Amino acid sequence: MTKLLFDSIFVTCKLEELDDFIKEKETIEDSIDELRLNVNRKMNITDPEHSISSVSSCNASVLSEVKLPTLSVPTFNGKIENWIMFKDMFVASVIENKSISNSMKLQYLKASCRDEALRVIRSIYF
């Protein structure tokens, strides 16, 4: 699904902006990969005070009382500067949700797009 969105953005780029777009995308992806690697390294450091077993010993009834705010599905208007934030939020809130069917994910995508992005994906059916 995210590849489809990237392809749509890629297709709408002006030819003279294409090389810059690809370079910027690769730079951002490299930065994200590096950040993920750093986070994974830090999470793998074993510290007895912060180990999973000590965290899992927390009282479950206290944790169940925490009320988290409802997350809304982000919107995307087709502007490349908004793409990364939209993609990350959409993947986390919709794509990775196994309880949502693929056709519903497509409907969420269509409902989340505006302007140029909506024009690009409007005719896609599942």
Image: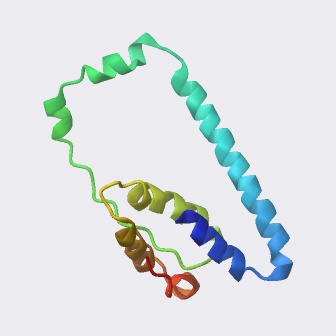
Out of 3 and 113, give the one closest to the viewer. Answer: 3
Give the percent coordinates (x, y) of residue 87: 54, 62
Give the percent coordinates (x, y) of residue 35: 63, 40
Establish if 36 lies above or below 87. above
Colouring scheme, one of rainbow, by chain, secondary structure, one colour: rainbow
Out of 2 and 27, give the one closest to the viewer. Answer: 2
Residue at left offset 63%, top offset 32%: 38
Residue at left offset 43%, top offset 59%: 95
In this rendering, position of residue 38 left or right of residue 110: right
In this rendering, position of residue 113 left or right of residue 60: right
The furthest residue to the front: 126
Establish if 126 lies above or below 25. below
Establish if 27 lies above or below 75. above
In this rendering, position of residue 19 left or right of residue 13: right
Give the percent coordinates (x, y) of residue 28: 70, 54
Q: Quadrant of residue 48?
A: top left
Q: Quadrant of the C terminus?
A: bottom left
